[in-house]
Image (cartoon, rainbow, N blue to C red):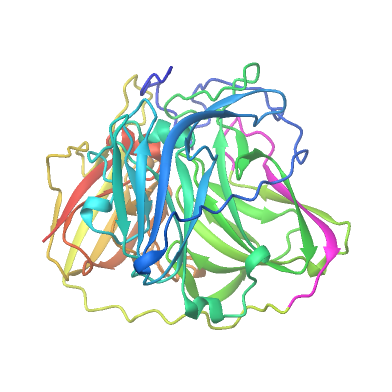
Amino acid sequence: TGFTGVSLLPVLNARDASAAAPQQAAAPVVTPFSVPMPLVPVLSPVSTSGGVDRYEVTMRATSKEILPGLTTDLLTFDGHFPGPTIKARRGRPVVIRQRNETAVDTSVHLHGASVPQNSDGSPMDVIAPGAERVYTYPNRQRPASLWYHDHAHHVESENVYRGLHGSYLLSDADEAALPLPKDAYDVLIGIRDAHFDTTTGQLIYTMSDRARSTILVNGAPYPYFEVAARKYRLRFANTSNQRFVELGLEDGSDMIQIASDGGLLPEPYTTKTVYLSSGERADVVIDFSRYPVGTKIVLKNTAGFGPVEEVGQVMRFDVVRTADDPSSVPSTLRTLPPLPQPTAERTVVLRMDEDGRVDPKAYIDEKLYDPERVDARIRFGASEIWTVTNANAKASHNFHLHLVQFRVLERAGAAPGPAESGLKDTVVLKPGETVKLQMTFDSYRGTYVYHCHMLDHSAMGMMATMKIC
Ligand code: C2O
Ligand code: CU
């Protein structure tokens, strides 16, 4: 079906503006704000008996109109782009039968979740074309906006790019009891980029492609979203392969961030921007009641991506009506468990070839990913401090571990900002930056990976294995 696997172009890192890339005109591929933002459908379980929600999902190729008048071939969960949202309740397991009807290996990873190894969707634990596999998610952790995506080694980057990603929203009674905006006013906003052949509408995939300059929100290019003049909870998720976004309203007005990767922050905080590297999530509350009906406000991306950056716009909120608003943002959202006394410390160094060679590699501790090798041996129950450094002078990375949510103790030698005051599973590392993380390995034993979540980088080797026993 025309998948070329992985093609390695000269590496083009996000900070090196001089590197040559497949260039694309600076004009947007579609008139911004000409299509409505789709709401991502919620998947229905096939059964809910015995205290377990069971789902059946088929991964398959499909095609869809994304750019007006053109057709784009995609890889999908159940024909949806992005994948359907799964809504889970804490304490209620979810069991998903995933059938792979694509022509490539897949492996479904639930990002941010604490699950047994055989349901982790690890890189080598793949579902061959024509095969299926059952994943079991215990949902013992606190509520959070998680997401699921392909993780089959060396093809995950292209598979995710072509559409194998979706959201998994975990809730519980405690969170539901908070007066936060709910139901129709609690909206997923999945942001990613793409590189289209604008004559055929097909997605172009090359490794480290800096021309992925079209922003898709819930699968639609630069959409508009009609809102009521009241508060909304918006769940931002950056599901791009490599792109980082810094989201802000064009009038510079405030948003209230209430949650990060691992769920609610201890306290809400008011901010003008939200920075998300690839794989990170943040829930914010925006109060549109400050705008008169008829106002249109653009959500901008000010992170930039070099010379092929297109319009710096993401989507537009159109305030179209008034509405009652019983919601509010409490001043305390959650009490985090105290940090245990650390029992071990280790360091991790991320580095990739930055010199534009033809077959660039990316390393953790100067080693390429080798699924046969255990890189970190961890005692079950340990609470560890990991000092993670980006050794590149120009390239950014980020860092994600499976199995655990962690706390950020330090960023660049200082206390982290409020956006990193809660639980996280992915952290950004700007060039030369170091973060100190603490995590506790008391949920499951087994082998799990940790890696850069710029998926082109993990596919180039920036991934390693930890064994908890
Ligand atoms: Cu989002 Cu190892 O994954
Ligand atoms: Cu990286």
Count of numbered marks: 0
Q: Residue at x 48, y 78 (%)?
A: 173
| Spot occupied by residue 425 in the image (x, y as percentages of width and height) | 37, 59
* Residue 289 makes an appearance in the image: yes
| Spot occupied by residue 361 in the image (x, y as percentages of width and height) | 29, 30
Q: Is residue 236 left or right of residue 286?
A: left
Q: Residue at x 78, y 38 (%)?
A: 34
Occupied quadrant, residue 5: top left
| Spot occupied by residue 148 in the image (x, y as percentages of width and height) | 41, 49
Question: Can you say which quadrant of the picture contains the N terminus?
Answer: top left
Q: Is residue 173 left or right of residue 178?
A: left
Q: Is residue 338 left or right of residue 443?
A: right
Question: Can you say which quadrant of the picture contains the C terminus?
Answer: bottom left
* Residue 396 makes an appearance in the image: no
Tell me, yes or no, whether the highlighted magenta stretch contains residue 97: no
Q: Which residues are magenta?
A: 304-325
Residue 323 against residue 226 in the figure, above or below? below
Tell me, yes or no, whether the highlighted magenta stretch contains residue 316: yes
Residue 245 against residue 60 in the figure, above or below? below
171 or 391, nearer to the observer = 171
Occupied quadrant, residue 324: bottom right
63 or 367, nearer to the observer = 63
